[in-house]
């Protein structure tokens, strides 16, 4: 039985054996491992397909049980190895801890030793410092002793007339030897000075020392020059230091500046004459042209100064031990020598052209120099790129101010400004003044004597002015001369016409433009404290010329013409001066109130006087214009009356065959309307606004008054009533076209009175009760009604009196 079982079991294969190495391989796959166990458990008969194919789980169970047993064995083996490894790790950690403890003890011991050594070194350093100090002191003493010995040797040799020792030291060519030589020479000079008053030997020694010092100084200057030409900064710096210690450094600074190419070049330029191009000359003297800017050579010099100062200031800082002082000397020389010389030449040249040329150049020069100064301050020079130091800033400001003091002090500038404006204004008004002087030549001047003399002085001033002497194009354009072909225009060629004697608004605009330029220039060139006085002076010039010599003359001439009118039809062309006069007044007083008076606010006195002067001038001019208008009204009304007086007695009593529907107005009416139409046309051209309305209102009222009286003088028959109504309709239509509201009611009344001559007697009463006539008392209308031929025949008076 047992044998049978054993035989039966032997048909199943044993399970595969495996070890730990199989599981530690990177190629181990659990699925493959299980499949391997499974394959080994399948009986051979089943693998071959023989026998019963029913599934038998026992082989698998035995195989997996064997595998589990093997796994237990491997697990025990692994546990034993793990225990051994843990024990090894524990022993290693214990050994590592002991090692760290031993290293810590050694580190603490080393650190303590280091502290001990550091303390020892510190103590030794103090000793070394003390020893070093003593050695340094000893070295200084030794050096002083050596210097004293060398000085004594040199002095002794100088007393014997021997300078060889110092000469040899000087000729080594080393900067440090030159420094020592200079120091010894200075000390020898001090020794000799202390012993002055001794024997002749001492005097001879002194002379030798002075001669040697001069020779040494020249030698150092030559070294500096050579270094400057080669731009060896260190060599220049050494020489500058020696010479500064030797004699204060004045000679080396002077030598440094004298060798600059800038001063050499500007010296040659300033030795020549200033030549200004013809186009620039014309623009400088022509007030209608914009200022052409600064003269090119002066502008170029200022630009070059800016560049040179920036470049050389860097050299000064690197070379000299006292750069601020050297820079100050440099700046003074640049401003007071090169720039001032050129500025004076340019201003002197432009002064020969005209006052305006001088003033424009002065303004442009000062603006450019101030811009230069501000640029230099911002650049910083020796402190570049920081701001300029306070001391050097003061030097720059002082030099800028001193450049222009000769031209701006003692109100000299404003006098030139006044001369310029007077010259320009007189030139512009020259033809105007000549025309009106000729006009008044053969008249009894009376109150005009003063004005004529004033104009004569103005003309004389133009003739003697720089503009006239130069005979340039600016003068020709201002006066209005035409250049002849192949030659210049001369003042003797001035020919005036009627147009030259009339006001010109463009002239006033030019005058104000010139004045505005002068005002802007005065604000820039004069001090703020002088501004009120300046604008007050400019106001006086403006009013003197634009009012006294221009508007007043034109208005007085207009009044003269008005007063000279005879009984003939008046020539009203003089009234045309009123419109340009009012425009010029508007421009002038607008400029005064917006540009001049506000600038005088810092001085209450000046402002009060300017306002008073301006208001007085305005009132005077307005009064003259009103007088001319009133005189014109009187002339027009008077001549209108003379025309109406020519109305014939029978004009309104014609025969029946003399009147038809096509008959026009009477000749008198036509002549009056023609004259009034001319008056209206002149008024439209000469007046505007309230002046025009007032003028037409006065003329219309005067005409209406004349007509109301006129209708009382003539007998009117039935046919004449038609003529009369046509006349009145003509008058009314003429005035209505003016559009003056105040005349409407008056001429409507006149029209209704004219209708009283036309309507039949039976309708008179109703007519008088209707419209504007209803407001008129019958007694006032009676003088017109009695002029009707049928007044008595039909009993008009009875009709009117009946209820």
Image (spheres, helix red, strand yellow):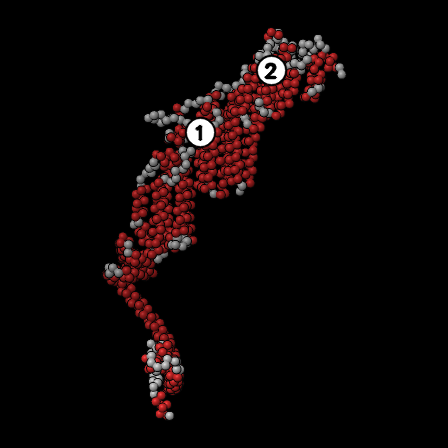
The residue at 52%/27% (across/down) is 579
Q: Residues within 10 Å of mark 2 (few under 14, many from 20)?
A: many
Q: Is residue 601 shown above or below 228?
A: above
From where the camera sits, is residue 487 visible?
yes
Q: Residue furthest bottom?
A: 2
**Residue 337 % position (x, y):** 35, 45
Give whichever of 112, 361 is nearer the camera. Answer: 112
SS label for mark 2: helix
The residue at 58%/26% (across/down) is 693
Q: Which of labels 2 and 1 is toward the front?
A: 2
The residue at 67%/14% (across/down) is 759
Q: Residue furthest front?
A: 51
Name the image quarter holding the C terminus.
top right
The residue at 31%/41% (across/down) is 271
Relative to 593, 268 lies left or right: left
From where the camera sits, is residue 699 visible?
no
Residue for badge 1: 428
**Residue 210 % position (x, y):** 29, 56
Relative to 788, 138 lies left or right: left
Residue for badge 2: 727
The image quadrant of residue 625 is top right
Residues tagged 2 and 1 counted as in contact (Cβ below 8 A): no
Give whichever of 785, 709 is nearer the camera. Answer: 785
Q: Is residue 295 shown above or below 17?
A: above
SS label for mark 1: helix
Of labels 2 and 1, earlier in sequence is 1
Give whichever of 364, 17 is nearer the camera. Answer: 17
**Residue 191 % position (x, y):** 32, 61
Q: Mark 2 to mark 1: distance in Å?
A: 51 Å
Name the image quarter holding the N terminus.
bottom left
Give whichever of 511, 692 is nearer the camera. Answer: 692
Q: Is residue 672 shown above or below 202?
A: above
């Amino acid at each position: 039985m047992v044998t049978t079982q054993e035989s039966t079991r032997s048909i199943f294969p044993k399970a595969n054996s495996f070890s730990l190495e199989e599981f530690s391989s990177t190629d181990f796959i659990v699925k493959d491992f299980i499949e391997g166990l499974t394959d080994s458990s399948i009986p051979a008969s089943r693998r071959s397909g023989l026998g019963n194919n029913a599934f038998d789980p026992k082989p698998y169970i035995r195989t997996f049980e064997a595998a589990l047993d093997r796994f237990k064995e491997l697990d025990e083996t692994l546990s034993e190895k793990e225990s051994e490894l843990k024990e090894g790790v524990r022993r290693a950690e214990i050994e590592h801890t002991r090692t760290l403890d031993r290293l810590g003890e050694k580190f603490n011991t080393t650190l303590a030793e280091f502290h001990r050594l550091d303390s020892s070194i510190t103590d030794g350093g103090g000793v070394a410092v003390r020893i070093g100090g003593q050695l340094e002191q000893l070295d200084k003493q030794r050096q002083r002793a050596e210097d004293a010995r060398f000085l004594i040797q040199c002095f002794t040799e100088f007393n014997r007339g021997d300078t060889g020792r110092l000469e040899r030291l000087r000729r080594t060519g080393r900067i440090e030897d030159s420094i020592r030589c200079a120091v010894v020479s200075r000390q020898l000079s001090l020794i000799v000075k202390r012993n002055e008053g001794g024997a002749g030997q001492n005097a001879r020694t002194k002379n030798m020392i002075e001669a040697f010092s001069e020779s040494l100084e020249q030698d150092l200057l030559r070294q500096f020059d050579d270094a400057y030409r080669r731009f060896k900064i260190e060599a220049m710096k050494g020489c500058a230091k020696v010479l500064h210690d030797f004699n204060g450094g004045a000679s080396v600074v002077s030598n440094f500046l004298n060798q600059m190419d800038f001063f050499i070049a500007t010296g040659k330029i300033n030795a020549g004459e200033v030549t200004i191009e013809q186009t620039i000359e014309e623009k400088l003297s022509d007030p209608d042209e914009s200022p052409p800017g600064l003269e090119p050579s002066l502008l170029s010099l200022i630009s070059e100064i800016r560049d040179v100062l920036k470049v050389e200031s860097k050299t000064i800082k690197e070379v000299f031990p006292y750069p601020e002082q050297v820079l100050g000397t440099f700046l003074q020389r640049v401003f007071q020598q090169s720039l001032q010389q050129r500025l004076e030449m340019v201003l002197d040249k432009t002064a020969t052209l005209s006052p305006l040329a001088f003033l424009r150049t002065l303004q442009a020069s000062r603006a450019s120099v101030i811009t230069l100064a501000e640029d230099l301050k911002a650049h910083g020079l020796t402190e570049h790129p920081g701001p300029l130091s306070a001391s050097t800033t003061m030097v720059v400001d002082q030099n800028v101010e001193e450049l222009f003091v000769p031209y701006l002090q003692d109100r000299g500038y404003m006098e030139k400004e006044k001369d310029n404006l007077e010259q320009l204004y007189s030139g512009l008004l020259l033809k105007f003044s000549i025309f009106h002087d000729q006009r008044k030549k053969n008249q009894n001047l009376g109150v005009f004597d003063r004005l004529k003399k004033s104009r004569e002085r103005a003309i004389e001033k133009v003739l003697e002015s720089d503009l006239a002497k130069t005979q340039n194009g600016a003068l020709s354009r201002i006066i209005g001369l035409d250049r002849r072909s192949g030659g210049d225009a001369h003042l003797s060629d001035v020919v005036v016409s009627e147009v030259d004697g009339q006001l010109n608004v463009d002239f006033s605009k030019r005058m104000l433009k010139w004045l505005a330029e002068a005002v802007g220039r005065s604000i820039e060139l004069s001090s703020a404290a002088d501004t009120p006085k300046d604008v007050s002076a400019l106001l006086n010039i403006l009013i003197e010329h634009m009012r006294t010599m221009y508007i007043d003359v034109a208005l007085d001439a207009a009044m003269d013409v008005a007063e000279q009118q005879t009984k003939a039809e008046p020539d009203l062309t003089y009234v045309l001066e009123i419109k340009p006069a009012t425009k010029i007044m508007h421009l002038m007083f607008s400029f005064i109130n917006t540009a001049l008076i506000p600038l005088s606010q810092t001085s209450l006195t000046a402002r009060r006087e300017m306002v008073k002067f301006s208001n007085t001038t305005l009132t005077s001019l307005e009064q003259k214009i009103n007088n001319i208008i009133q005189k014109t009204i009187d002339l027009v009304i008077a001549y209108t009356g003379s025309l109406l007086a020519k109305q014939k007695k029978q004009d309104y009593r014609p025969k029946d065959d003399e009147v038809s529907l096509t008959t026009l107005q009477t000749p008198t009416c036509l002549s009056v309307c023609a004259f009034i139409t001319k008056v209206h046309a002149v008024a439209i051209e000469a007046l505007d606004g309230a002046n025009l309305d007032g003028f037409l209102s006065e003329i219309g009222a005067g005409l209406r008054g004349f007509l109301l009286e006129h209708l009382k003088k003539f007998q009117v028959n039935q046919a004449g009533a038609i003529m009369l109504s046509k006349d009145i309709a003509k008058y009314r239509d003429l005035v209505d076209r003016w559009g003056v509201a105040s005349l409407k009611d008056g001429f409507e009344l006149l029209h209704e009175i004219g209708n009283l001559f036309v309507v039949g007697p039976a309708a008179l009463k109703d007519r008088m009760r209707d419209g504007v006539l209803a407001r008129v008392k019958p007694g006032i209308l009676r003088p017109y009604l009695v002029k009707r031929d049928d007044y008595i025949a039909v009993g008009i008076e009875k009709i009117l009196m009946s209820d």
